[in-house]
Image (cartoon, helix red, strand yellow):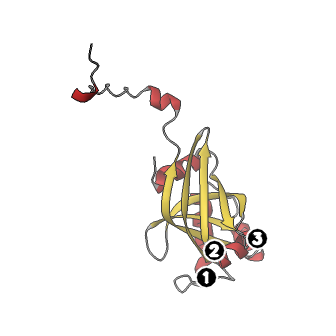
Amino acid sequence: MTNLRDAAALGRAEQGLAVVSTLRADHTIQSTLVNAGIIDHPHTGRPALAFVTAGPVKRAHLRARPQITVTFRSAWQWASIEGRALLAGPDDPQPWLGRADLPSLLRAIFVAAGGQHDDWDNFDAVMAEERRLAVFVDPVRVYSNPATLRESADLEPPAPAAPAANERESR
């Protein structure tokens, strides 16, 4: 398992939860928990990892250093997506996103991350009041842990290789 959609499937098993790691100015890592999901990027049309945040620390880190790693996990299986973050929101305008389109984008990301809401007008109001923004991760690298022990047990072990002529024991 090492593609974007498979990685996000782990998150769906855990209510969309993912650990986001950003780079501080002193080159140490700052991590936080978010709900994330996969949507088609509104500008490129390519699948992208996305989440909604108002976190001033994440925002500042990503503005200065857009490198990001997002890790999903379920039980002992995990998958990480590394890439560059692109911010889109009231304080981070993008030419492809009109101000009037931001509420529907935040809703789409929220739903892709496993969210549900009974009052979308209230949702939109809170997002606007908190100046929430969309974070898109353009994946550069996706990787995961190897097969679990159970999956490995289902695989047949490789047949032992015959020793080369110069490696055979002589008696």
Task: Evaluate if marks 1 and 3 touch, with contact meaning CB atoms under 8 Å apart.
Answer: no
Q: Vertically, is 106 above or below 2? A: below
Outermost residue to the top: 171
- From the viewer's side, name the closer residue of 79 and 98: 79
Q: Vertically, is 93 above or below 42? A: below
Q: State the residue position of label 1.
A: 100
Quarter of the figure that contains the C terminus: top left
What's the residue at 46%, 30% (across, down)? 152
Q: State the residue position of label 3.
A: 57
What's the residue at 66%, 73% (across, down)? 62
Find residue 23 and report its image quarter.
bottom right
Q: Position of residue 49 (x, y in %)?
A: 54, 63
Find residue 117 and report its image quarter.
bottom right
| Gap in angstroms between the C-alphas marked 2 and 1 | 7 Å
| Gap in angstroms between the C-alphas marked 3 and 2 | 22 Å
Q: Is residue 111 left or right of residue 29?
A: left
Q: Residues within 10 Å of mark 3 (few under 14, many from 20)?
A: few
Question: What amino acid type is highlighted by mark number 2?
Answer: Pro
Task: Evaluate if marks 2 and 1 touch, with contact meaning CB atoms under 8 Å apart.
Answer: yes
Q: State the residue position of label 2.
A: 103
Query: Sequence order check: which comes first, mark 1 or mark 3?
Result: 3
Q: Vertically, is 146 above or below 103? A: above
Q: Position of residue 107 (x, y in %)?
A: 62, 66
- From the viewer's side, name the closer residue of 69 and 75: 69
